[in-house]
Image: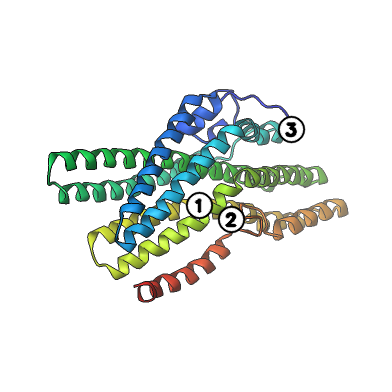
Amino acid sequence: MIEMASSETEPNLFALCKPTGILAKALYSGRKVVFLCLVISIAINFLTWILQFWLATNITVKIYSAIYSIYRISYVTFILLLYLNRKKYIDLFNHFERNAEISSLCPSLVRYLEKNRLSMKIQMVLSYSCFFVLRTMYLAENFNSLEEIFLNTVHFIIKSQGLLSCFIFLRFFAETCLYIQCCFMQVEHQIDIFRSSTDRFSVNNVRQIRHLYCLAVEITEKFDYLLLPVTCFNFAFSLIEGHFAFANAIKYHNLTALLTCIGEFSILLLIVLQMISINHRATRIYEKVYSFSFRTDSLNASKEVQLLLVRIAHADVGLTFLGIFVITPTCVTSLATISLTIALAAPTILY
């Protein structure tokens, strides 16, 4: 692999598309202490959920404790894998800009990044707020003795820190998906430049677009390989959590069930939207590329356009679930229909 600079501050046009946040900055700068703090915070939180699982007598509490225990220990593993593969991530975050020879950024890219990053923050704050309110309600209900207040407060702080650490990693994952989307937006921008040009469309123009598209696909495939455990886990467990939270909201008509459902679905929406947007961005340029076939009489240029159209039409670009299928908008829509049916039936079956 081509050796790339690891500095976040390296001046380049595509730098603003790279992931931001605490974990991303630690990745670029190599700050081990950030990774260590996150791992310790989540690991301690994992122990509290395990303890709660063994002490709980209510089946609902046991299920939630089991789910969150698996969630926490998995995130510890993901952060450790991120640290071990940090050089590969840094290389990939520089690979597209270095090889694409970008002369100008897509005009809508900055606005797109701002909108998506704001959306991520809103969804995470909403989910965290639901958790905060739930824990505050629990503290208020167990206001019996000073010793119990102290233990519940410590428990609250540990769980809050653990959840916050998980959100820090989750933001890195979501922004990595956003970075891949930006690569395809840059390809689309190059297509728009050629479409608006009055010059004759040539074979070199098509090959330049094919080169950019292949670079974006290559980066997607490499990130898919690195993020495969994270993608599969987040996709599967977010659906499971969403099902269980929705079933509880239907079964128990109370504020606790409602806030849990809102919190879980906020994270589910964040993860799923960023993943399916990669495939959407990779396939939406089909019509624009097809329009090139009307602008050239060159047989070679027409063949190049056809090759690119065939590749885009495969619609197999994006993050995958265990390499079995690509997570696409159509796939998620079908799963959502099935999931809604299961979630509606779950209260009757389980309870």
Does residue 100 appear to the left or right of 284 in the view shown?
right
Q: Which residue is mark 2?
A: 280
Specify which label sits upstream in the sequence, 2 or 3: 3
110 relative position to 57: left or right:
right
Q: CA distance from mark 1 to mark 2?
A: 19 Å
Q: Could you say whether the residue bearing mark 3 is in a helix, strand or loop?
A: loop
Q: Quadrant of the C terminus?
A: bottom left
Locate residue 350 relative to residue 203 in the image: left or right.
Answer: left
- Where is mark 1, residue-wise? 234
- Name the spot of residue 132 as percent of width and height, x first: 27, 46
Q: Is residue 14 visible?
A: no
Residue, x 48% and y 33% (percent of image)?
A: 23
Disc 1 or 3, which lies upstream in sequence?
A: 3
Q: Identify which amino acid the numbered label 2 is placed on.
A: His
- From the viewer's perspective, is the residue at label 2 or at label 3 nearer? 3
How far apart, in angstroms, are the residues tagged by discs 1 and 3? 28 Å
- Amino acid type at circle 3 is Met
Q: Position of residue 260 (x, y in %)?
A: 32, 56
User: Element at badge 1?
Assistant: helix
Q: Which mark is residue 1?
A: 3
Dot 2 surroundings within 10 Å: few (below 14), some, or many (20 or more)? Answer: some
SS class, disc 2: helix
Residue 138 shown left or right of residue 27 in the figure: left
* Residue drawn 77% across the image and 47% down it: 206
Earlier in the chain: of badge 1 and badge 2, it is 1
Disc 1 crowd rating (10 Å Cα; few below 14, some 14-19, many 20+) is many
Q: Percent from the top left, x then y, of residue 292?
A: 73, 54
Q: Nearer the viewer, residue 310 or 241?
A: 241
Q: Are marks 2 and 3 in contact (CB under 8 Å)?
A: no
Residue 168 seen in this snapshot:
yes
In this rendering, the answer to whether 2 lies above or below 156 is above
